[in-house]
Amino acid sequence: MRHRVSGRRLGRDTAHRKALRKNMIAELLIHEEILTTEAKARMLRPAAEKIITLAKRGLAKGDPAQAVHARRLAAARISRFRQAEDESGDMEEVDVVKKLFDDIAPRFADRPGGYTRMVKIGKRSGDNADMAMIMLVNEE
C-alpha cells in the first residue's frame, strides 16, 4: 500500500525522473503546449506551475537581488538551453530561462495561479496509453 507516499515514479529511477521533469518543463515553456501521456502530464503540471510562480517572484521591481535569486533558482530547476525550430524551419538555440522571465512571467503577472491546462486526448494507438495535451493558458 502507498499510504502517504507522494509523487509519481513513472517506472524510472530518481535521476531519470528528474531529467524527464526538467526537459518536459523546458519543452512546455518553449512550445507552450506538449502532447504526452496523462501520467506524465499530471506529474508535470504542479512542477511547471511552481516554476512560473518563481518567475513571477523574479519580476519584483523593488529588489534586484530577489530577481537574480529567482533566475538562478529557475536555471537550476529546468534545462537552460534547448534547440527549437523557428518559422523558416531552421534550428535555433533558445534560452528557456530568458523566455520564462521575459515572455511568460509578465503574461501571468496578474493571475493568482492556474497557468496550465490539461486536456485529455484519448488513447494512444500503439500501447493504449491515456494521452493528454498540457498547455499554458491564454490570458483573456
Image (spheres, grey):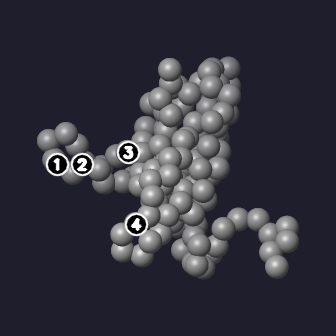
Q: Which residue is mark 1?
A: 90
How far across and how far down the image is residue 55, in percent? 59, 36
Disc 3 and disc 1: Cα gap in Å? 15 Å
Disc 4 to disc 1, C-alpha distance: 30 Å
Residue kind at label 4, given as amino acid type: Arg
- Counting from the top left corner in percent of width and height, residue 92 is at 25, 48
Q: Quick check: 52 above or below 63?
A: below
Q: Residues within 10 Å of mark 4 (few under 14, many from 20)?
A: few
Residue at coordinates 43% horizontally, 38% vertically from top-left?
99
Along the line of sight, the residue nearer the viewer: 43 or 132: 132
Q: CA distance from mark 2 to mark 4?
A: 25 Å
**Mark 3 or 1, nearer chain start:** 3
The residues bearing labels 3 and 4 have C-alpha atoms spaced at a distance of 21 Å
Residue behind mark 2:
85
Disc 2 crowd rating (10 Å Cα; few below 14, some 14-19, many 20+) is few
Q: Earlier in the sequence, mark 4 or mark 1?
A: 1
Mark 1 burial class by Cα count in 10 Å: few <14, some 14-19, many 20+ = few
Instruction: Give amino acid for label 3.
Output: His
Can you tell which quarter of the image residue 6 is in? Answer: bottom right
- Please say if 105 is above or below 48: above
Residue 31 bears which disc, if any? 3
Assign a secondary structure to mark 4. Answer: loop
Q: Residue 37, position in %: x, y?
A: 49, 63
Earlier-in-chain disc, 3 versus 4: 3
Look at label 1 and name its amino acid. Answer: Asp
Upstream in sequence: badge 2 or badge 4:
2
Residue drawn at point x = 54 percent, y = 56 percent: 41
Would residue 27 be visible to someone looking at this image? no
Q: Which SS class for mark 3?
A: helix
Figure quadrant of residue 32: top left
Q: CA distance from mark 2 to mark 3?
A: 10 Å
Label 4 or label 1, whichever lies nearer to me, is 4
